[in-house]
Image (spheres, rainbow, N blue to C red):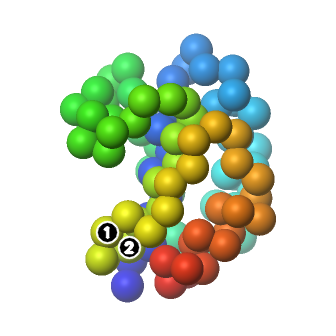
């Protein structure tokens, strides 16, 4: 089963910059998870499909669909719990 983490961000978003190092650490520790950064300024259609209204928004999904979503800066433990729930 494929587990994906979509990181919806914008270059002008301060909290997104705070989230980045946390995601970098998780990405290094979870090589089997597909990490995808989605710039909402360039990819508005995808952001609309996922109903992204605030940044940063993280969406954890697997082949069955969305498992969890987080809005705002999210702690590593919460993201890891969602990844494990998704099958990582």
Left or right of 33: which side holds 75?
A: right
- Establish if 10 lies above or below 74: above
**Residue 62 seen in render:** yes
- Establish if 31 lies above or below 40: below
**Which residue is found at the position 22% from the left and 32% from the top?**
45
Estimate the x, y position of residue 3 in percent, counting from the top left: 44, 73
Cβ atoms at labels 1 and 2 below 8 Å apart: yes
**Which residue is found at the position 68% from the left and 69% from the top?**
80
On the rendered image, what quadrant is the C terminus found in?
bottom right
Element under label 2? strand
Q: Quadrant of residue 53?
A: top left
- Establish if 13 lies above or below 32: above
Question: Label 2: how many residues lie within 10 Å, few (<14), some (14-19) or many (20+)?
Answer: many
On the rendered image, what quadrant is the N terminus found in?
bottom left
**Which residue is found at the position 51% from the left and 24% from the top?**
10
Give the residue pinned by disc 2: 62
Estimate the x, y position of residue 57 in percent, counting from the top left: 52, 41
User: Residue 51 has which mark?
Assistant: none
Estimate the x, y position of residue 49 in percent, counting from the top left: 24, 42
**Which residue is found at the position 47% from the left and 38% from the top?**
8
Element under label 1? strand
User: Residue 65 has which mark?
Assistant: 1
Estimate the x, y position of residue 54 in percent, counting from the top left: 50, 29
Measure the alpha-carbon separation of dots 1 and 2: 5 Å
């Amino acid at each position: 089963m494929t587990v994906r983490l979509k990181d919806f961000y914008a270059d002008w978003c301060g909290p997104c910059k705070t989230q980045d190092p946390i995601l970098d650490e998780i990405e290094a520790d979870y090589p089997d998870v597909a990490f995808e950064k989605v710039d909402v300024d360039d990819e508005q259609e995808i952001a609309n499909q996922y109903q992204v209204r605030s940044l940063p928004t993280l969406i954890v999904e697997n082949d069955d669909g969305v498992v969890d979503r987080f809005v705002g800066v999210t702690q590593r433990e919460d993201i890891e719990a969602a990844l494990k729930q998704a099958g990582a």
